[in-house]
Image (cartoon, grey):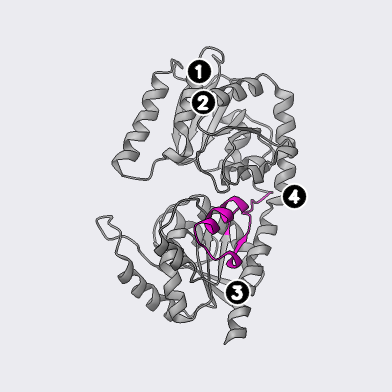
Protein backbone atom coordinates (compact mmCIF):
# COMPACT_ATOMS: atom_id res chain seq x y z
CA UNK A 1 0.00 0.00 0.00
CA UNK A 2 1.24 3.47 -0.87
CA UNK A 3 0.93 6.14 1.80
CA UNK A 4 0.26 9.54 0.24
CA UNK A 5 0.70 12.71 2.30
CA UNK A 6 -1.57 15.53 1.15
CA UNK A 7 -0.46 19.06 2.04
CA UNK A 8 -3.07 21.81 2.51
CA UNK A 9 -2.71 25.48 3.41
CA UNK A 10 -6.08 26.61 4.74
CA UNK A 11 -8.79 25.05 6.95
CA UNK A 12 -11.51 26.02 4.48
CA UNK A 13 -13.16 24.14 1.62
CA UNK A 14 -12.83 25.61 -1.86
CA UNK A 15 -12.67 24.10 -5.32
CA UNK A 16 -9.19 22.62 -4.97
CA UNK A 17 -9.95 20.94 -1.66
CA UNK A 18 -13.31 19.64 -2.86
CA UNK A 19 -11.74 18.26 -6.03
CA UNK A 20 -9.14 16.27 -4.12
CA UNK A 21 -11.61 15.07 -1.49
CA UNK A 22 -13.95 13.81 -4.20
CA UNK A 23 -11.18 11.47 -5.35
CA UNK A 24 -10.46 10.12 -1.85
CA UNK A 25 -12.74 7.03 -1.79
CA UNK A 26 -11.56 5.96 -5.23
CA UNK A 27 -7.91 6.34 -4.25
CA UNK A 28 -8.47 4.38 -1.05
CA UNK A 29 -10.21 1.61 -3.00
CA UNK A 30 -7.16 1.54 -5.29
CA UNK A 31 -4.90 0.85 -2.31
CA UNK A 32 -3.67 4.29 -1.26
CA UNK A 33 -3.52 5.32 2.39
CA UNK A 34 -4.26 9.03 2.67
CA UNK A 35 -2.75 11.25 5.36
CA UNK A 36 -3.38 15.00 5.35
CA UNK A 37 -1.01 17.65 6.67
CA UNK A 38 -3.51 20.42 7.35
CA UNK A 39 -5.06 22.64 10.03
CA UNK A 40 -6.71 20.23 12.45
CA UNK A 41 -9.96 22.17 12.89
CA UNK A 42 -12.44 23.65 10.47
CA UNK A 43 -14.49 22.43 7.48
CA UNK A 44 -11.53 20.80 5.74
CA UNK A 45 -10.51 18.75 8.78
CA UNK A 46 -14.12 17.63 9.22
CA UNK A 47 -14.39 16.47 5.62
CA UNK A 48 -11.01 14.74 5.75
CA UNK A 49 -12.13 12.83 8.82
CA UNK A 50 -15.36 11.83 7.08
CA UNK A 51 -13.26 10.61 4.15
CA UNK A 52 -11.16 8.43 6.45
CA UNK A 53 -7.98 10.42 5.95
CA UNK A 54 -5.87 10.93 9.06
CA UNK A 55 -5.11 14.58 9.80
CA UNK A 56 -1.64 15.51 11.03
CA UNK A 57 -1.79 19.10 12.36
CA UNK A 58 0.20 21.50 10.20
CA UNK A 59 -0.49 25.21 10.64
CA UNK A 60 0.75 27.89 8.26
CA UNK A 61 -0.27 30.83 10.43
CA UNK A 62 0.41 31.96 13.98
CA UNK A 63 -2.21 32.81 16.62
CA UNK A 64 -2.58 36.36 15.23
CA UNK A 65 -3.29 35.13 11.70
CA UNK A 66 0.15 36.05 10.35
CA UNK A 67 1.69 33.60 7.94
CA UNK A 68 4.84 31.99 9.29
CA UNK A 69 8.05 32.53 7.34
CA UNK A 70 9.10 30.04 4.69
CA UNK A 71 12.25 28.52 6.11
CA UNK A 72 10.87 27.62 9.59
CA UNK A 73 7.86 26.12 7.85
CA UNK A 74 10.11 24.05 5.62
CA UNK A 75 12.07 22.80 8.62
CA UNK A 76 8.86 21.76 10.35
CA UNK A 77 7.50 20.19 7.18
CA UNK A 78 10.70 18.19 6.73
CA UNK A 79 10.47 16.81 10.29
CA UNK A 80 6.77 16.01 9.95
CA UNK A 81 7.17 14.26 6.62
CA UNK A 82 10.23 12.34 7.78
CA UNK A 83 8.25 11.02 10.74
CA UNK A 84 5.31 9.98 8.54
CA UNK A 85 7.51 8.24 5.97
CA UNK A 86 4.99 8.52 3.11
CA UNK A 87 5.54 6.96 -0.29
CA UNK A 88 5.03 10.36 -1.84
CA UNK A 89 3.96 13.93 -1.05
CA UNK A 90 1.16 15.74 -2.89
CA UNK A 91 0.91 19.51 -2.42
CA UNK A 92 -2.57 20.70 -3.32
CA UNK A 93 -1.85 24.30 -4.35
CA UNK A 94 0.80 26.55 -5.82
CA UNK A 95 1.72 27.93 -2.40
CA UNK A 96 2.05 24.47 -0.88
CA UNK A 97 3.92 23.26 -3.93
CA UNK A 98 6.44 26.03 -3.55
CA UNK A 99 6.84 25.28 0.15
CA UNK A 100 7.23 21.55 -0.37
CA UNK A 101 9.40 21.42 -3.50
CA UNK A 102 12.80 21.98 -1.87
CA UNK A 103 11.81 19.86 1.15
CA UNK A 104 10.86 16.85 -0.97
CA UNK A 105 14.01 17.24 -3.07
CA UNK A 106 16.23 17.35 0.02
CA UNK A 107 14.53 14.26 1.49
CA UNK A 108 14.63 12.50 -1.91
CA UNK A 109 10.90 11.99 -1.46
CA UNK A 110 8.79 11.54 -4.61
CA UNK A 111 6.43 14.50 -4.87
CA UNK A 112 3.99 16.28 -7.09
CA UNK A 113 1.95 19.45 -6.85
CA UNK A 114 -1.28 20.68 -8.34
CA UNK A 115 -1.36 23.82 -10.48
CA UNK A 116 -4.84 25.12 -9.76
CA UNK A 117 -4.34 28.84 -10.43
CA UNK A 118 -3.39 31.04 -13.34
CA UNK A 119 -1.26 33.70 -11.65
CA UNK A 120 2.11 35.25 -12.31
CA UNK A 121 4.93 33.76 -10.22
CA UNK A 122 8.41 34.90 -9.35
CA UNK A 123 11.43 33.08 -10.76
CA UNK A 124 12.15 31.75 -7.28
CA UNK A 125 8.63 30.33 -7.00
CA UNK A 126 8.91 28.65 -10.39
CA UNK A 127 12.26 27.15 -9.39
CA UNK A 128 10.77 25.77 -6.16
CA UNK A 129 7.85 24.22 -8.04
CA UNK A 130 10.16 22.66 -10.59
CA UNK A 131 11.77 20.62 -7.78
CA UNK A 132 8.74 18.31 -7.88
CA UNK A 133 8.77 15.19 -10.02
CA UNK A 134 5.42 16.09 -11.56
CA UNK A 135 3.23 19.18 -11.91
CA UNK A 136 -0.49 18.55 -12.46
CA UNK A 137 -2.30 21.34 -14.30
CA UNK A 138 -6.09 21.32 -14.10
CA UNK A 139 -6.45 22.44 -17.73
CA UNK A 140 -4.44 22.92 -20.88
CA UNK A 141 -4.82 26.67 -20.45
CA UNK A 142 -3.24 26.39 -17.01
CA UNK A 143 -0.43 24.22 -18.36
CA UNK A 144 0.40 26.61 -21.19
CA UNK A 145 0.38 29.61 -18.87
CA UNK A 146 2.84 28.08 -16.43
CA UNK A 147 5.16 26.66 -19.07
CA UNK A 148 5.35 30.16 -20.56
CA UNK A 149 6.64 31.46 -17.23
CA UNK A 150 9.32 28.83 -16.87
CA UNK A 151 7.91 25.60 -15.50
CA UNK A 152 9.59 22.44 -16.75
CA UNK A 153 7.35 21.40 -19.67
CA UNK A 154 8.05 17.64 -19.54
CA UNK A 155 6.92 17.59 -15.91
CA UNK A 156 3.64 19.47 -16.49
CA UNK A 157 0.72 17.22 -17.31
CA UNK A 158 -2.99 17.95 -17.53
CA UNK A 159 -5.44 16.18 -15.25
CA UNK A 160 -8.99 17.46 -15.26
CA UNK A 161 -10.86 17.59 -11.96
CA UNK A 162 -13.84 15.30 -11.63
CA UNK A 163 -17.34 15.40 -10.19
CA UNK A 164 -19.40 12.73 -8.49
CA UNK A 165 -22.04 12.26 -11.18
CA UNK A 166 -24.38 10.46 -8.79
CA UNK A 167 -24.36 13.29 -6.24
CA UNK A 168 -24.42 16.05 -8.87
CA UNK A 169 -27.19 15.04 -11.23
CA UNK A 170 -30.21 16.56 -12.96
CA UNK A 171 -33.14 16.94 -10.60
CA UNK A 172 -36.57 18.46 -10.97
CA UNK A 173 -36.74 21.81 -9.17
CA UNK A 174 -38.87 21.53 -6.04
CA UNK A 175 -39.14 25.20 -5.11
CA UNK A 176 -37.46 24.80 -1.72
CA UNK A 177 -35.05 27.64 -2.42
CA UNK A 178 -37.90 29.95 -3.37
CA UNK A 179 -39.61 29.07 -0.10
CA UNK A 180 -36.47 29.55 1.97
CA UNK A 181 -35.89 33.01 0.52
CA UNK A 182 -39.60 33.94 0.46
CA UNK A 183 -39.48 34.38 -3.31
CA UNK A 184 -42.72 33.95 -5.28
CA UNK A 185 -43.03 30.49 -6.88
CA UNK A 186 -42.02 30.50 -10.50
CA UNK A 187 -39.73 33.52 -10.24
CA UNK A 188 -36.49 33.17 -12.19
CA UNK A 189 -33.43 32.43 -10.03
CA UNK A 190 -30.16 33.60 -11.58
CA UNK A 191 -27.26 32.46 -9.44
CA UNK A 192 -23.51 32.90 -9.17
CA UNK A 193 -21.48 30.56 -6.97
CA UNK A 194 -18.00 31.47 -5.78
CA UNK A 195 -15.89 33.46 -3.35
CA UNK A 196 -16.64 37.18 -3.23
CA UNK A 197 -13.33 38.25 -4.72
CA UNK A 198 -12.46 40.50 -7.65
CA UNK A 199 -11.32 37.67 -9.93
CA UNK A 200 -14.78 36.07 -9.78
CA UNK A 201 -16.35 39.11 -11.46
CA UNK A 202 -19.45 39.57 -9.31
CA UNK A 203 -19.22 43.30 -10.03
CA UNK A 204 -19.83 42.52 -13.71
CA UNK A 205 -22.89 40.51 -12.71
CA UNK A 206 -24.10 43.44 -10.59
CA UNK A 207 -23.88 45.79 -13.56
CA UNK A 208 -25.65 43.27 -15.78
CA UNK A 209 -28.43 42.94 -13.20
CA UNK A 210 -28.80 46.72 -13.19
CA UNK A 211 -29.18 46.70 -16.97
CA UNK A 212 -31.93 44.09 -16.70
CA UNK A 213 -33.77 45.52 -13.69
CA UNK A 214 -36.78 46.67 -15.74
CA UNK A 215 -36.56 44.09 -18.53
CA UNK A 216 -36.67 41.18 -16.06
CA UNK A 217 -38.83 42.48 -13.19
CA UNK A 218 -39.42 39.01 -11.71
CA UNK A 219 -35.83 37.76 -11.82
CA UNK A 220 -34.01 37.28 -8.54
CA UNK A 221 -30.21 37.42 -8.35
CA UNK A 222 -28.44 35.04 -5.95
CA UNK A 223 -24.81 35.39 -4.87
CA UNK A 224 -23.74 32.16 -3.21
CA UNK A 225 -20.36 32.39 -1.52
CA UNK A 226 -18.42 34.37 1.05
CA UNK A 227 -15.44 36.66 1.33
CA UNK A 228 -12.54 35.04 3.19
CA UNK A 229 -9.78 37.60 2.74
CA UNK A 230 -9.50 40.22 5.47
CA UNK A 231 -7.46 42.59 3.31
CA UNK A 232 -8.83 46.12 3.03
CA UNK A 233 -9.29 45.87 -0.73
CA UNK A 234 -11.28 42.64 -0.36
CA UNK A 235 -13.55 44.19 2.28
CA UNK A 236 -14.05 47.25 0.06
CA UNK A 237 -14.86 45.04 -2.93
CA UNK A 238 -17.59 43.17 -1.07
CA UNK A 239 -19.04 46.47 0.15
CA UNK A 240 -19.05 47.78 -3.42
CA UNK A 241 -21.05 44.75 -4.54
CA UNK A 242 -23.74 45.44 -1.97
CA UNK A 243 -23.81 49.10 -3.00
CA UNK A 244 -24.07 48.33 -6.73
CA UNK A 245 -26.91 45.88 -6.24
CA UNK A 246 -28.65 48.28 -3.87
CA UNK A 247 -28.44 51.04 -6.47
CA UNK A 248 -29.74 48.82 -9.28
CA UNK A 249 -33.41 49.35 -8.41
CA UNK A 250 -34.04 45.63 -8.06
CA UNK A 251 -36.64 46.00 -5.33
CA UNK A 252 -35.10 43.48 -2.94
CA UNK A 253 -34.40 40.93 -5.66
CA UNK A 254 -30.67 40.57 -4.87
CA UNK A 255 -29.76 37.97 -2.26
CA UNK A 256 -26.34 37.43 -0.68
CA UNK A 257 -26.57 33.89 0.69
CA UNK A 258 -23.01 33.38 1.93
CA UNK A 259 -21.56 29.88 2.00
CA UNK A 260 -24.27 27.28 1.45
CA UNK A 261 -24.10 23.55 2.16
CA UNK A 262 -25.74 21.21 -0.29
CA UNK A 263 -24.72 22.78 -3.59
CA UNK A 264 -25.76 19.60 -5.39
CA UNK A 265 -29.34 20.23 -4.24
CA UNK A 266 -29.17 23.98 -4.79
CA UNK A 267 -27.95 24.08 -8.39
CA UNK A 268 -31.03 22.40 -9.94
CA UNK A 269 -33.22 25.07 -8.35
CA UNK A 270 -31.55 27.76 -10.47
CA UNK A 271 -32.93 28.98 -13.76
CA UNK A 272 -29.41 29.92 -14.83
CA UNK A 273 -25.93 29.70 -13.40
CA UNK A 274 -23.89 32.77 -14.32
CA UNK A 275 -20.12 32.64 -13.92
CA UNK A 276 -18.56 36.03 -14.80
CA UNK A 277 -15.03 35.16 -13.67
CA UNK A 278 -12.02 37.15 -14.86
CA UNK A 279 -9.64 34.19 -14.37
CA UNK A 280 -10.63 30.56 -14.23
CA UNK A 281 -8.25 27.60 -14.56
CA UNK A 282 -11.14 25.09 -14.50
CA UNK A 283 -14.12 26.33 -12.52
CA UNK A 284 -15.40 23.60 -10.23
CA UNK A 285 -18.88 25.08 -9.98
CA UNK A 286 -19.10 24.90 -13.78
CA UNK A 287 -18.32 21.18 -13.62
CA UNK A 288 -20.94 20.73 -10.90
CA UNK A 289 -23.56 22.74 -12.76
CA UNK A 290 -22.85 20.78 -15.94
CA UNK A 291 -23.30 17.52 -14.03
CA UNK A 292 -26.62 18.84 -12.70
CA UNK A 293 -27.77 19.75 -16.20
CA UNK A 294 -28.08 23.45 -15.36
CA UNK A 295 -27.83 25.98 -18.17
CA UNK A 296 -24.69 28.10 -17.76
CA UNK A 297 -23.42 31.45 -18.96
CA UNK A 298 -19.70 31.86 -18.39
CA UNK A 299 -16.89 34.16 -19.41
CA UNK A 300 -14.57 32.73 -22.05
CA UNK A 301 -11.40 32.66 -19.95
CA UNK A 302 -8.79 30.10 -18.90
CA UNK A 303 -9.99 26.52 -19.00
CA UNK A 304 -13.71 27.31 -19.34
CA UNK A 305 -13.59 26.64 -23.09
CA UNK A 306 -12.24 23.17 -22.26
CA UNK A 307 -15.32 22.46 -20.16
CA UNK A 308 -17.65 23.91 -22.78
CA UNK A 309 -16.04 23.78 -26.25
CA UNK A 310 -18.08 25.92 -28.66
CA UNK A 311 -18.83 22.87 -30.83
CA UNK A 312 -20.44 21.12 -27.86
CA UNK A 313 -23.22 23.70 -27.55
CA UNK A 314 -23.14 23.06 -23.81
CA UNK A 315 -23.06 26.64 -22.48
CA UNK A 316 -23.19 30.24 -23.55
CA UNK A 317 -19.75 31.87 -23.42
CA UNK A 318 -19.39 35.67 -23.25
CA UNK A 319 -16.39 38.03 -23.27
CA UNK A 320 -14.73 38.84 -19.98
CA UNK A 321 -15.55 42.14 -18.22
CA UNK A 322 -18.48 42.82 -20.54
CA UNK A 323 -21.67 43.41 -18.56
CA UNK A 324 -23.61 44.30 -21.72
CA UNK A 325 -22.85 40.94 -23.35
CA UNK A 326 -23.62 39.16 -20.09
CA UNK A 327 -26.96 40.95 -19.75
CA UNK A 328 -27.87 40.12 -23.35
CA UNK A 329 -27.11 36.43 -22.83
CA UNK A 330 -29.15 36.30 -19.61
CA UNK A 331 -32.13 38.01 -21.24
CA UNK A 332 -32.03 35.66 -24.22
CA UNK A 333 -31.88 32.48 -22.18
CA UNK A 334 -34.49 33.59 -19.66
CA UNK A 335 -36.87 33.92 -22.62
CA UNK A 336 -35.97 30.50 -24.11
CA UNK A 337 -36.77 27.60 -21.76
CA UNK A 338 -36.23 25.01 -24.50
CA UNK A 339 -32.74 26.38 -25.18
CA UNK A 340 -31.93 26.28 -21.46
CA UNK A 341 -32.99 22.63 -21.38
CA UNK A 342 -30.90 21.85 -24.45
CA UNK A 343 -27.84 23.54 -22.94
CA UNK A 344 -28.31 21.63 -19.70
CA UNK A 345 -28.58 18.30 -21.49
CA UNK A 346 -25.45 18.98 -23.55
CA UNK A 347 -23.60 20.07 -20.41
CA UNK A 348 -24.49 16.80 -18.66
CA UNK A 349 -23.04 14.89 -21.61
CA UNK A 350 -19.80 16.87 -21.24
CA UNK A 351 -19.66 16.00 -17.55
CA UNK A 352 -20.27 12.32 -18.23
CA UNK A 353 -17.67 12.04 -20.98
CA UNK A 354 -14.86 14.22 -19.57
CA UNK A 355 -15.33 15.06 -15.88
CA UNK A 356 -16.50 11.92 -14.08
CA UNK A 357 -14.73 11.62 -10.71
CA UNK A 358 -13.94 7.96 -11.41
CA UNK A 359 -11.94 8.99 -14.46
CA UNK A 360 -10.20 11.81 -12.58
CA UNK A 361 -9.31 9.55 -9.63
CA UNK A 362 -7.95 6.86 -11.94
CA UNK A 363 -5.75 9.49 -13.55
CA UNK A 364 -4.50 10.72 -10.19
CA UNK A 365 -3.75 7.17 -9.05
CA UNK A 366 -1.79 6.62 -12.24
CA UNK A 367 0.30 9.73 -11.58
CA UNK A 368 0.94 8.59 -8.01
CA UNK A 369 2.17 5.21 -9.22
CA UNK A 370 4.28 6.71 -11.99
CA UNK A 371 6.00 9.16 -9.66
CA UNK A 372 6.64 6.47 -7.04
CA UNK A 373 7.93 4.00 -9.65
CA UNK A 374 10.26 6.52 -11.25
CA UNK A 375 11.74 7.32 -7.86
CA UNK A 376 12.17 3.62 -7.08
CA UNK A 377 13.92 3.03 -10.39
CA UNK A 378 16.36 5.85 -9.71
CA UNK A 379 17.19 4.55 -6.23
Q: Secondary structure at mark 3?
A: helix
* Residue to which mark 4 is pinned: 353
Which is closer to the viewer, label 4 or label 1?
Answer: 1
Q: Are marks 4 and 1 in contact (CB under 8 Å)?
A: no
Which mark is first along the chain, 1 or 3? 1
Q: Is residue 184 left or right of residue 339?
A: left
Q: Secondary structure at mark 4?
A: helix
Local crowd at mark 2 within 10 Å, few (<14), some, or many (≥20)?
Answer: many
* Residue situated in front as seen by the camera: 44 or 242: 242
| Magenta span | 137-165
Q: Position of residue 51 (x, y in %)?
A: 55, 61
Q: Residue at x 56, y 15 (%)?
A: 216
Q: Are marks 3 and 1 in contact (CB under 8 Å)?
A: no
Q: Residue at x 49, y 68 (%)?
A: 130
* Residue situated in front as seen by the camera: 305 or 243: 305
Q: Are marks 4 and 3 in contact (CB under 8 Å)?
A: no
Local crowd at mark 3 within 10 Å, few (<14), some, or many (≥20)?
Answer: many
Q: Tell whether position 159 is magenta.
A: yes
* Residue to which mark 2 is pinned: 323
Q: How many marks?
A: 4
Q: Is residue 153 above or below residue 160?
A: below
How far is mark 3 from mark 2, CA to CA?
45 Å
As drawn, the label of residue 211 is: 1
Which mark is first along the chain, 2 or 3? 2
How far is mark 2 from mark 4, CA to CA?
32 Å
Q: Position of residue 153 (x, y in %)?
A: 58, 64
Q: Is residue 363 visible?
A: yes
Which mark is first along the chain, 1 or 4? 1
Q: Secondary structure at mark 1?
A: helix
How far is mark 1 from mark 2, CA to CA?
8 Å
Amino acid sequence: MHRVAWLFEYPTLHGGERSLLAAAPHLQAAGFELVALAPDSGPLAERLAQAGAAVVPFEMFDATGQRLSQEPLRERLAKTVAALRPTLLHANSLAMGRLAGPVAAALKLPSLTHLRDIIKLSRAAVADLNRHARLLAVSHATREFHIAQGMDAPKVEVLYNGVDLAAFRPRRATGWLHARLNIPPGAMLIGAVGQLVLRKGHDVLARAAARLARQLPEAHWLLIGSRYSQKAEAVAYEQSLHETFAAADLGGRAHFLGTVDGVAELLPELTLLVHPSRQEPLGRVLLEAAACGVACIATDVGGTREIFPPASGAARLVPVDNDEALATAVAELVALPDERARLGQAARVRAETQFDICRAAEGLARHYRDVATQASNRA
